[in-house]
Amino acid sequence: MHWKASRLFNGVILAEKVRTRIDKLVYGGDGIGRLPDGRAVFVPFTLPGEVVELQIVQEGKKFARGRLINLLEASPERIQPRCKHFGTCGGCHYQHIPYDAQLQAKLAILQDQMDRLGGFSALPNGGITSSPFAWNYRNQVQFHPAPEGGLGFMDIDGKSVVPIQECHLPTEGINALWQQIDLGAEAGLTRITLREDSFGELMLVLEGNDELGPELSLDLPISVCYLKPDGSCLTLAGHDQLTYQVLGRQLSLSPESFFQVNLGVAEKLVEYVLDHLPQTITLNTLELYAGAGLFSLFLAEHSRELIAIESSPSACYDFANNLDSYDNVRLYEGPVEQVLPALMDELPPLDLVLLDPPRAGLHPRAPESLEKLSSEHIVYISCDPSTLARDLKHLCAAGYKLEDLHLFDMFPQTYHLETTAILQRE
């Protein structure tokens, strides 16, 4: 190894540039290698087996982070990224990896996370479902105003905005629209979101610190909404709802409500859940973090009673609209960790609990309530394998068995993982 000495760290001479071999990919999009002192070093945009020259940009007692300077020995799997902003923009992490290899890497990363953080050395062989489209799949994209005007994305360090001229992840409709948007630096906006529904309707969602919103000059057939600092929404043009079609059903969504960005994979995920329902004619179902009703819309017809909990006011509004025709559905608005304990004495014996929590996973109080409920089956949908591993470890210690674990590639070209776990009470 060739070192260029610069300073001491814990008695070890560090270097501005150092060579290392990348051992594997880890969650977060980085490759991991070893420094001569034994510490792990995380390097973005690398591949297993590659020998790289890197610059240390952050260091700790047990690990360091590096920036790729030179690729000394490239992996035979490495391909040319499609986007000229790759490596600077923080939106993509895997454009240098063929899509099939991305899928296998994600499976290996999930296994590693479940083993190290959850103690699951052997997992059910659930596999991974690929995206119908590896590019132009996102029906929602968030931009930031660039300092010199125009739109951009956050850089790989999350510290500054990178002005962009191209992006290959949004749908064709969104891609055709964002390049026509002219926002001056004086617009006072903090974030700009573009959404496209299943029928090609486009919505521009603006966010800022002004109560009144920006002045608008519009010559495009789109809807425009403004999210005020207090979270309320002001419709500036067009409609205040988008419509998404999933497996022949339609869901109505407000501008501020969450929805899966990859509709093709969302349909496969719903199908998977329905295929793994308990073999009971009618179920007593509890859904936590129910959102606008994506799963409830399909679970309601299989349920004797469906009780849903959701904290977002806009999602609750959409849920009520989307499930209006079902008399066997009850919705409670509020945080799961507050509402669920208060409902414990009112809930019937449960056949199924479905939960789709945010990236932070279950609130510390939620697993205790789930344990007391003693549902026969749990379906846990996760967007973060580390919190999933933590929560599954707790649930399995409380008497559940992990029956199936399946990945859905909701986010091609990125490190993000969407995982569904099926648990059955032993």
Image: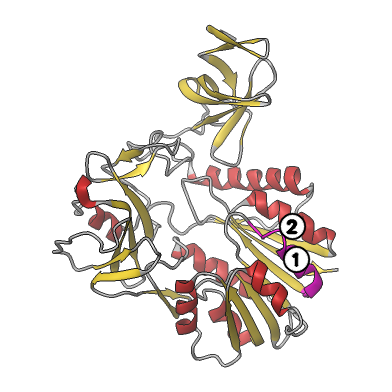
Which mark is drawn over residue 31?
Answer: none
Residue 26: x and y, percent? 61, 38
Vertical comparison of 217 with 237: above or below: above
Residue for badge 2: 392
**Residue drawn at the location 72% of the way across and 57% of the way down:** 391
Vertical comparison of 318 with 161: above or below: below
**Residue drawn at the location 64% of the way across and 19% of the way down:** 35
Residues 69 and 329: in front is 329
Q: As shown in the figure, which amino acid type bears the numbered disc 1? A: Leu
Magenta-drawn stretch contains 371: yes
- Residue stretch in magenta: 361-376
Q: Marks 1 and 2: CB-CB under 8 Å? A: yes
Vertical comparison of 401 with 51: above or below: below
Mark 1 residue element:
strand
Vertical comparison of 299 with 334: above or below: below
Q: Residues within 10 Å of mark 2 (few under 14, many from 20)?
A: many
Give the tally of numbered discs.
2
**Residue drawn at the location 79% of the way across and 50% of the way down:** 122
Q: Residues within 10 Å of mark 1 (few under 14, many from 20)?
A: many
Does label 1 or label 2 sit earlier along the sequence? 2
Mark 2 residue element:
helix
Residue for badge 1: 423
* Relative to 92, 342 lies left or right: right
